Amino acid sequence: MQPDEVLAHEPRVLAREQREFYFANGYLLVEAVVPPDWLERLRAATEEMVDRSRALTKSDRIFDLEKGHTADEPRLRRLTSPVDHHPEYWAFASEAGSVLGDIMADLVGPDVKFHHSKLNFKWAKGGEEVKWHQDITYWPHTNYSPLTAGLYLYDCGPDQGPLMVVPASHDGELYSQYDDQGQWAGCLSDADVKGVATDTAAELTGPAGSITIHNCRVVHGSRPNHADAGRPLLLNVYSAADAFPYTANPLPSSHAGDIVRGRPALWAHHDPRPCLVPPDWSAGYTSLFALQQQEKWEDVQSRS
């Protein structure tokens, strides 16, 4: 569905100006849109999951641990597929009572499909940077409607490594995320970064309950978190129902492909622009952090 076709549908949450801004710039920040009751539910669920991680001494397929993680002082980089590990996450991602699905319908059209989720913690005093990258080549689809919606569970300021996006980069080049040796790096090369207007990057800070949204082609990243407070960002990926993945989902979920608004598509929409194909993710992967830091799975598992 093209932007003008999406705009032809009455909005559920967003103003027309917000929708037009997203289509022009490839991103949107909706401040404090998630009400306190949802935040309380999601924070409680997150505390439960952090407590569950205390028993671990190495990363596994669910928890990606940061160096220095202990039972007394847990440090997490990522919770993989949270919608499969606590019902509150899936409720927020899918239920009619959640504002999230309605915002997605305002941007991809009335028929909305879920793809995957993750919770990136960016722990206090050391949460790692995320290098400049584009999402879609991790999980190619038949079109470029997929987008990622991130929820700040707590206030996020500039010193906490907020999401940074390069405006209008979704209409620019789609870069290779392989290195010179043909290995998946998961980010743009230094040479390619020089050709991107990163000096124009928007820093998406906001109070708790704010939602960051970026299109799958947008160049984005974030700085390390050196602040005293963490920056848990709950990320859910959606697409128009007529977008179909043609490679394995790197973060498999029992809910992948579920329709959260509207109806399933009877026809696939194919964008004529090509898309880079990633490695075979059929066995999954640890996390974006591990890939960008070139950590091998056995090294991640042995880290304590």
Image (cartoon, rainbow, N blue to C red):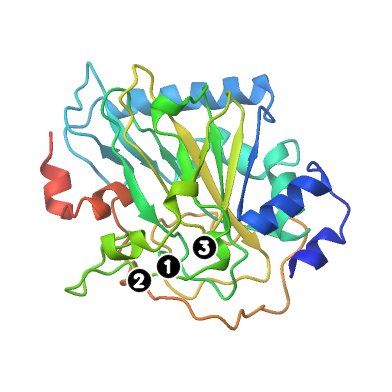
| Nearest to the observer: residue 268 or residue 187 | 187
Q: Is residue 48 above or below residue 80?
A: above
The residue singled out by tag 1 in the image is 137
Q: Quadrant of residue 114?
A: bottom right
Lower sequence index among marks 3 and 2: 2
Please tell me which residue is depicted at 71% across the width and 37% down the height of the picture. 98
- Label located before the other in sequence (3 or 1): 1
First along the sequence among labels 1 and 2: 1
Residue in the foreground of this view, choosing between 151 and 242 = 151
Q: Residue at x 47, y 43 (%)?
A: 164
**Residue tagged by mark 2?**
176
* Foreground disc of the pair 3, 1: 3
SS type, badge 3: loop
> Along the horizontal axis of the image, is 289 left or right of 137?
left
Element on which disc 2 rests? loop
Q: Nearer the viewer, residue 231 or 301?
A: 231
The label shown at residue 61 is none
User: How far across and down, in percent of the image, does residue 239 sit?
Assistant: 62, 61
- Of badges 1 and 2, nearer the viewer stands 2
Residue under the point 48% across and 24% down: 157
